[in-house]
Image (spheres, helix red, strand yellow):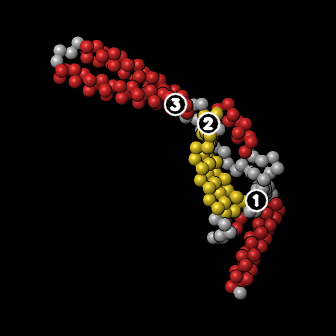
Amino acid sequence: GIIQDENRRNMGNVVYDDYYRHSGNANAYIYVRVPQENYDAFINSIEDKDGNIVVCNISKSIQNMTKQYYDTESRLRSLRIQEERLFDFMESANSVSEMLDVEDRLTDVQYEIDSATNSLATIDNDVKYSKVSLNISEVVKYTNKPENPKNFFERVWSYITGSADEFTDTLEYWLEAAIYMI
C-alpha cells in the first residue's frame, strides 16, 4: 500500500486529567491506500497476535462510482463528437472572425475533454485501492470490558470492583499531588 498522509504526536509525560492517566501520550493518524486484493490481509495484519495491539473499532463503507463513471464517460463521448464537428466548422469557416469563434469554442471543449479524461483516470485509480484511516493511540492501562452482569449479585460485585478501581486511582492521584507539593 501507500501511506498518503501521516500525523504523529507524542506529548511526553504530560498528564492533564484522569482520562490521560489510562491513555498514553503518543498517538498517530495514518491514511493508507491499500491495493484492493491486499485489503483483507492488511486489515487482518493490523491486530497483533500477542494482544499488544487491539483494534477497538472498524467501520467500513463503500462508495459506488458506477453512475458517476458512466455519466462522465457519456459526457466525454459527447464532447469528442462536438470536437470533431468544431474541427469541421473550422475548415469551412469563411472569415477570420468565424475561425476565431470556433477556435474559442474548441478550446473550451478540449478543456472539458481533458477534465473528463482526468476524472475517469482518477476513478480508475481510486477503485484499485481501498482507503484505510488508522487512528492509533498509546494505552497505558488496558483492560478488557467484562460482559454485562446478568443477575443482582453480579451487578453489585461489578459496582464494588469498579468503585475500588476508582478509589485506588483517586488515592494514587492524591498521593502524587501530595508528593509533588512537598
Q: Quadrant of the C terminus?
A: bottom right
Camera-side mark, 2 or 1: 2
Percent position (x, y) of residue 91?
25, 13
**Disc 1 residue type (three-letter):** Tyr
Q: Nearer the viewer, residue 44 or 143?
A: 44
Determine the CA span between mark 3 and mark 1.
Answer: 41 Å
**Disc 2 residue type (three-letter):** Ser
Q: Is 106 situated left or right of 136 in this image?
A: left
Q: Residue at (36%, 29%) from the top-left corner?
A: 111
The image quarter containing residue 61 is top right
Q: Which residue is mark 2?
A: 130
Determine the CA span between mark 2 and mark 3.
Answer: 12 Å
Camera-side mark, 3 or 1: 3
Q: Which residue is mark 1?
A: 142
**Residue 123 numbered tag:** 3
- Characterize the local packing of mark 2: few (<14), some (14-19) or many (20 or more) Cα atoms within 10 angstroms: some
**Secondary structure beneath disc 3?**
helix
Q: Quadrant of the N terminus?
A: top right
Q: Is there any visible trace of residue 6 in the rendered image?
A: yes
The image quarter containing residue 46 is top right
Which mark is first along the chain, 1 or 2? 2
**Disc 3 residue type (three-letter):** Ile
